[in-house]
């Protein structure tokens, strides 16, 4: 039987937001704000995808080896 991973847990709990970082939006018509938010959104999406991809490599079997 294959060991469960942290990705399995993430999926089981409903795939919640990974980051609790919100974008500033006090002036939604501001072109600078729009550009910054677009860049931040892209960066956060890439970071989230990388983190989620790494969750599959962290198994409960590996974590259990840290305990005697």
Image (spheres, rainbow, N blue to C red):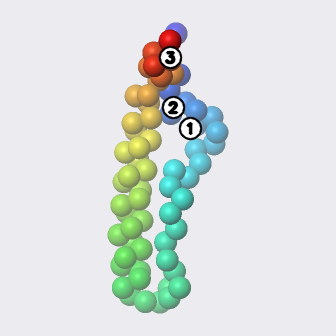
Marks 2 & 1, CB-CB < 8 Å contact: yes
Q: Report crowding for label 1: few under 14, some 14 to 19, many 20 or more residues within 10 A (C-alpha).
A: some
Q: Is residue 42 left or right of residue 12?
A: left
Q: Is residue 44 left or right of residue 14?
A: left
Q: Nearer the viewer, residue 14 or 68?
A: 68
On the image, the x and y values in percent for residue 31 come to 38, 87
Task: Nearest to the eye among marks 3 and 1: give it.
Answer: 3
| Residue at image location 49% in from the left, 72% down from the top | 23
Question: What whole-number distance in Å separates the C-alpha atoms at marks 3 and 2?
Answer: 17 Å
Which residue in the protein does label 1 denote?
10
Q: Which label was assigned to residue 6?
A: 2
- In the current view of this chain or complex, which residue is farthest to the front? 68
Q: Secondary structure at mark 3?
A: loop
Task: Nearest to the eye among marks 3 and 2: give it.
Answer: 3
Question: What whole-number distance in Å separates the C-alpha atoms at marks 2 and 1?
Answer: 6 Å
Residue 32 occupies quadrant: bottom left
| Residue at image location 39% in from the left, 36% down from the top | 54
Q: Report crowding for label 3: few under 14, some 14 to 19, many 20 or more residues within 10 A (C-alpha).
A: few
Q: Is residue 51 visible?
A: yes
């Amino acid at each position: 039987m294959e060991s469960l991973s942290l990705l399995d847990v993430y999926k089981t709990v409903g795939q919640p937001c990974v980051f609790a970082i919100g974008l500033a939006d006090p002036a939604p018509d501001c072109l600078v704000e729009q550009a910054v938010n677009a860049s931040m959104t892209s960066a956060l999406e890439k970071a989230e995808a990388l983190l989620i991809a790494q969750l599959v490599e962290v198994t409960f079997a590996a974590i259990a080896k840290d305990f005697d």
